Amino acid sequence: MDDLERQLRELSPWLHTPETPDVTANVRARIAAPAPQPRRWRYYLAALLVALLVGLLPPGRAALAGAVAGLLRFAGVTIATAPAPEPPAGAPSPLPSQRSLPLDEAQRKVRFPLRGPAALGAPEQVLVADPDSTGAYRVASLLYRGGTLRLDAFDGRVDAVYLKRISGPGTEWVQVNGAFAVWVAGPHELTYVDRFGVARVETARLAASTLIWEEAGVTYRLEGDLPKAEAIGIAASVW
């Protein structure tokens, strides 16, 4: 036993025992360190995507515009909600430089395809209005049923062409051939907005229920004393 103890003592200078790590200090350092910040860019990116969806989808545009200013802009038509607007007084004047033309000539005088609903057949009268410097007309109107039913056609992708003022509920989203459309129920004030962006109050009139939709870059505005389902059916038959 004495020999073993002596041998161990002789080996002790050659042995190195590492110090015990200070685990307590490490734990305290981790606790004291600030927590890592969450990756906020993910939240910002999600908010941006939501905003884009709201801006791109028509119902989103409607909700956003209605919440901000009581306005809805769709396919060249601006709809403003106002408390009981005064109906236009007097007889409205025609649109600028409005004239009547045969259907084939009217087609040559506009810069967009002029198509009518197959459900209504040939129009009884065709009106064109607001020509530019080259003589190309901005709006074409197809009249049916003694003028009580009209289909306005125009390129509404850039500038506003019509301004509608309504009071209370009465505007809703519907679909025509699977695409979004706007139905304005009941009488409402209608004003033409010319090429310079000026609302021509002299043209203001009381319009009947209206269906607004867009197809192949052309905006259509079907106005008449029609129920919503019939108006949608007529719109779906545009050829």
Image (spheres, rainbow, N blue to C red):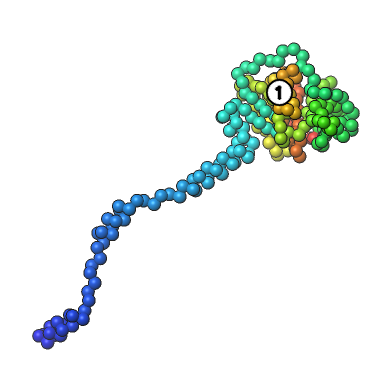
The quadrant in which the N terminus is found is bottom left
* Crowd class of label 1 (few under 14; some 14 to 19; many from 20; radius 10 Å): some
Whether residue 176 is visible to the viewer of this picture, yes or no, is: no
Whether residue 212 is visible to the viewer of this picture, yes or no, is: yes
Residue at figure coordinates x 49%, y 48% from the top left: 41
Task: Report the label total.
Answer: 1
Secondary structure of the residue carrying numbered label 1 = strand
Residue 17, horizontal then vertical, whole percent: 22, 74
Task: Identify which residue, 176 or 83, lies in the foreground.
Answer: 83
Residue 50, horizontal then vertical, whole percent: 56, 41
Q: Which residue is mark 1?
A: 199
Q: For residue 110, what is the image quadrant?
A: top right
Toward the front, the furthest residue is 133
Query: Relative to 148, is 87 on the left or the right?
Result: left
Location of residue 163 with respect to 38 vertically, above or below? above
Task: Identify which residue, 96 or 27, lies in the foreground.
Answer: 96
Location of residue 227 with respect to 87 vertically, above or below? below
Residue at figure coordinates x 61%, y 38% from the top left: 55
Task: Identify which residue, 82 or 236, lies in the foreground.
Answer: 82
Q: For residue 29, what is the image quadrant?
A: bottom left
Toward the left, the furthest residue is 2
Residue at figure coordinates x 73%, y 28% from the top left: 196
The quadrant in which the C terminus is found is top right
Task: Identify which residue, 94 or 234, lies in the foreground.
Answer: 94
Residue at figure coordinates x 24%, y 72% from the top left: 18
Query: Relative to 53, is 104 on the left or the right?
Result: right
Residue 170, horizontal then vertical, whole percent: 64, 24
Q: Amino acid at mark 1?
A: Ala
Toward the top, the furthest residue is 90
Location of residue 75 with respect to 96 vertically, above or below? below
